[in-house]
Image: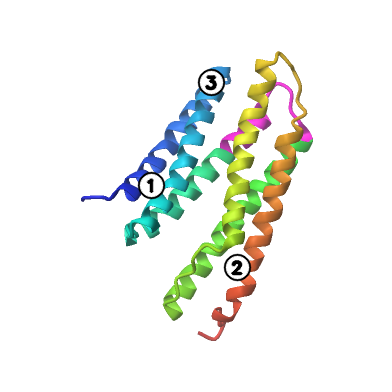
Amino acid sequence: MKMNLPNKLTVLRLLLVPVFVVVMMVSDALWASITGLCLFVLASFTDMLDGKIARKHNLVTDFGKFMDPLADKFMVLGAMLVILYQSMTRDVVNGLFCAVFFWAVLIVIFRELAVTSIRLVVSGSSGIVIAANMLGKIKTCTQIACVICCIAEPVIYQLLGMETDFLPVSLATAALMLIFTLWSGINYIVSYWKYLDPEK
């Protein structure tokens, strides 16, 4: 199967996800965190790049429409689950961060399931394809920023020789991500509720 450049970038992002997970899970060493951070930043960059190239050069395909959001969800959810696992198994556990991040991950999963289900129903009943709106794009940006901060902040502390379990930047971005995840999910449900007819 011949693929255009945006689709190749999407597949690359999808392939980077298991590599990122393995690197992050194989060791708690500093090199693993730095390598994982670089892999996630690279994957996030392909997310921005493939969409721009596809729209600019009219290379939008059905394959891309299906795989691009799927790759995004795998990338974000895979990273969040790794961060949650690591935060709960560290020698010094930050209870506040673990609690906030646990609920954030749970809400992200529920939100994605709800929105994906709504998209399938609306597409099947009316033929309307629900594109990502501005809130959805902001939500994705806050999720990516949260993952980057949650990996980078402990790395920075380690490089500076500081030992602390308090991660204020990670906590703040997790809370921000939580707000936009809820807001965008509720917005989708309210906007397309009229298509969810219980009698059909």
Crowd band around label 1 with a 10 angstrom C-alpha radius: few (<14), some (14–19), many (20+): many
Q: Is residue 84 magenta?
A: yes
User: Which residue has dot 3 on it?
Assistant: 27
Residue drawn 31% across and 47% down?
A: 5
Crowd band around label 2 with a 10 angstrom C-alpha radius: few (<14), some (14–19), many (20+): many
User: Which residue has dot 2 on it?
Assistant: 188
Query: The residue tagged with tag 2: helix, strand or loop?
Result: helix
Q: Is residue 117 left or right of residue 142?
A: left
Three-letter code, disc 1: Thr
x then y, percent, for residue 94: 76, 30
Three-letter code, disc 2: Tyr
Viewer can see residue 29? no
Residue drawn 42% across and 52% down?
A: 52
Residue drawn 46% across and 39% down?
A: 43
Query: The residue tagged with tag 1: helix, strand or loop?
Result: helix
Q: Earlier in the sequence, mark 3 or mark 2?
A: 3
Q: Which residues are magenta?
A: 81-95
Residue 143 vertical placement versus 62 (above, below): above
User: Which residue has dot 1 on it?
Assistant: 10
Count of all numbered marks drawn on residues in the image: 3
x then y, percent, for residue 147: 60, 38
x then y, percent, for residue 168: 76, 34
Three-letter code, disc 3: Ser
* Real-space Cα separation, disc 1 to disc 2, in angstroms: 25 Å
Front tag of 3 and 1: 1
Front tag of 3 and 2: 2
Residue 178 vertical placement versus 97 (above, below): below
Q: Which sits in the foreground, 9 or 106?
A: 9
Query: The residue tagged with tag 3: helix, strand or loop?
Result: loop
Q: Which mark is residue 114?
A: none
Viewer can see residue 108? yes
Residue 177 vertical placement versus 27 (above, below): below
